[in-house]
């Protein structure tokens, strides 16, 4: 699935958005990946399948090179990756797939300034996947030390004014290559929510709403009860294996960065559940125009087959969470769960693979940026 990953874009859309650098004689963008965690490794798998667009010239993480190579190859949730992955004696990760052999230098620096890129190596784009460097000031060394041109971040950047948040399929046209040198792919839940919001708001008008994301556990939780150094939320100190844990999500309020007219009109919570992957978002909207369940589903289905094809899915088959593991789409509406109460209250369930689906969108965003460099 990873070796043959195809972006959601149709050929017509590719031409419109300027994808396919080789069509206009452009060499692949040279990429440094910093942060080889869940999203970093999956984004690497997805992007590596596009050598015409990306060339990885350096990897960095805080752990040993052998650990990163091993986890690139083997994944308990997403399966074994096709290419052979090994480490030579010089802190280099070697990836072989048929006649293709990539040798990628590796460092294990906690700071951007400590990343020693080989002399003569040019870095044009950074995939920032550490989850640590999330302000303009913290990201700045990528430009001053690494001399990168663009940084694509795998999490919301916490700054005022905000860095441009892009949910591919919803607002990528806001990207201005002359000024947007840092872009973020927002969050996995924002990518799930935004396509649904787009369809409902543009057709029915959203007055207000709230969401609850039933979200699988992540490394911000603990395996057994223990103090949690990563998050102040006390519930995340309880075992992620045996508990349902209500917690915060910024996805609903972040929608205002995608659709500014909805600022202050959406909010929500998350419930962490003891599953390893695939989540579901419960969306409740108060809409301006009276509607019905058949109309809501028809609007979502039409969008999934046309302007949001490959981003928004529409499923009429009754499925469960494991059926959506490794689904590359951002959001998949569960048609049987759609409800309309008293004409103007709309309830929609949307599934998403919060790891792989989000990684696919991050790479699609990186492609969009690369096409304009």
Image (spheres, helix red, strand yellow):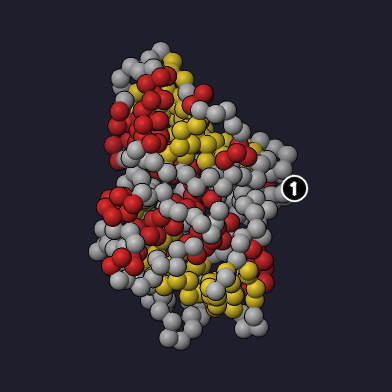
In the rendered image, residue 183, in percent from the top left (x then y), is placed at: 37, 58
Farthest residue in the top direction?
342
Q: Which residue is more in the foreground, 322 or 242? A: 322
Is disc 1 surrounded by few (<14), some (14 to 19) or many (20+) residues within 10 Å?
few
Give the quarter of the image for residue 342: top left
Total labels drawn: 1
Q: Which residue is drawn at 66% across and 36% down?
A: 244
Q: In which quarter of the image is the C terminus?
A: bottom left
Q: Seen in the image, is 73 located left or right of residue 30?
A: right
Q: Residue at x 33, y 40 (%)?
A: 307
In the rendered image, residue 282, in percent from the top left (x then y), is placed at: 51, 30
Q: What residue would you read off at disc 1?
A: 224
Question: Is residue 195 in sight in this rendering?
Answer: no
Q: Which residue is drawn at 28% across and 55% down?
A: 15
Question: Is residue 44 in sight in this rendering?
Answer: yes
In the rendered image, residue 86, in percent from the top left (x then y), is placed at: 65, 73
Q: Which residue is drawn at 57% across and 69% down?
A: 97
């Amino acid at each position: 699935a990873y070796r043959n990953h195809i972006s959601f874009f149709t050929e017509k859309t590719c031409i419109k958005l300027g994808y396919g650098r080789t069509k206009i004689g452009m060499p692949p963008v040279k990429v440094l990946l910093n942060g080889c965690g869940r999203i970093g490794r999956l984004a690497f798998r997805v992007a590596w399948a596009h050598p015409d667009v990306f060339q990885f010239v350096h990897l960095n993480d805080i752990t040993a090179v052998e650990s990163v190579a091993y986890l690139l190859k083997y994944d308990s949730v997403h399966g074994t990756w096709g290419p052979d992955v090994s480490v030579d004696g010089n802190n280099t990760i070697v990836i072989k797939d048929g006649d293709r052999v990539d040798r990628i230098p590796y460092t294990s620096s906690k700071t951007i300034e400590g990343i020693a890129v080989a002399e003569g190596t040019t870095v044009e784009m950074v995939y920032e996947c550490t989850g640590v460097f999330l302000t303009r000031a913290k990201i700045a060394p990528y430009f001053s030390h690494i001399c990168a041109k663009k940084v694509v971040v795998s999490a919301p950047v916490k700054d005022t004014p905000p860095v441009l948040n892009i949910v591919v399929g919803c607002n990528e046209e806001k990207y201005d290559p002359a000024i947007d040198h840092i872009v973020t792919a927002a969050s996995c839940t924002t990518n799930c929510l935004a396509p649904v919001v787009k369809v409902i708001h543009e057709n029915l008008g959203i007055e207000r709403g709230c969401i609850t994301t039933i979200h699988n556990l992540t490394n911000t939780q603990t395996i057994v009860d223990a103090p949690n150094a990563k998050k102040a939320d006390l519930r995340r100190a309880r075992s992620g294996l045996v508990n349902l844990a209500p917690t915060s999500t910024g996805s609903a309020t972040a929608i205002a960065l995608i659709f500014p007219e909805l600022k202050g009109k959406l909010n929500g919570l998350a419930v962490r559940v003891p599953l390893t992957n695939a989540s579901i978002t419960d969306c409740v909207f108060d809409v301006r125009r009276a509607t019905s369940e058949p109309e809501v589903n028809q609007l979502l289905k039409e969008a999934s087959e046309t302007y949001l094809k490959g981003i928004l899915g529409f499923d009429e088959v009754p499925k469960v969470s494991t059926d959506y593991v490794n689904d590359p789409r951002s959001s998949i509406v569960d048609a049987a769960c759609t409800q309309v109460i008293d004409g103007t209250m709309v309830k929609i369930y949307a599934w998403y693979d919060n790891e792989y689906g989000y990684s696919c969108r991050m790479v699609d965003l990186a492609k969009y940026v690369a096409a304009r460099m």
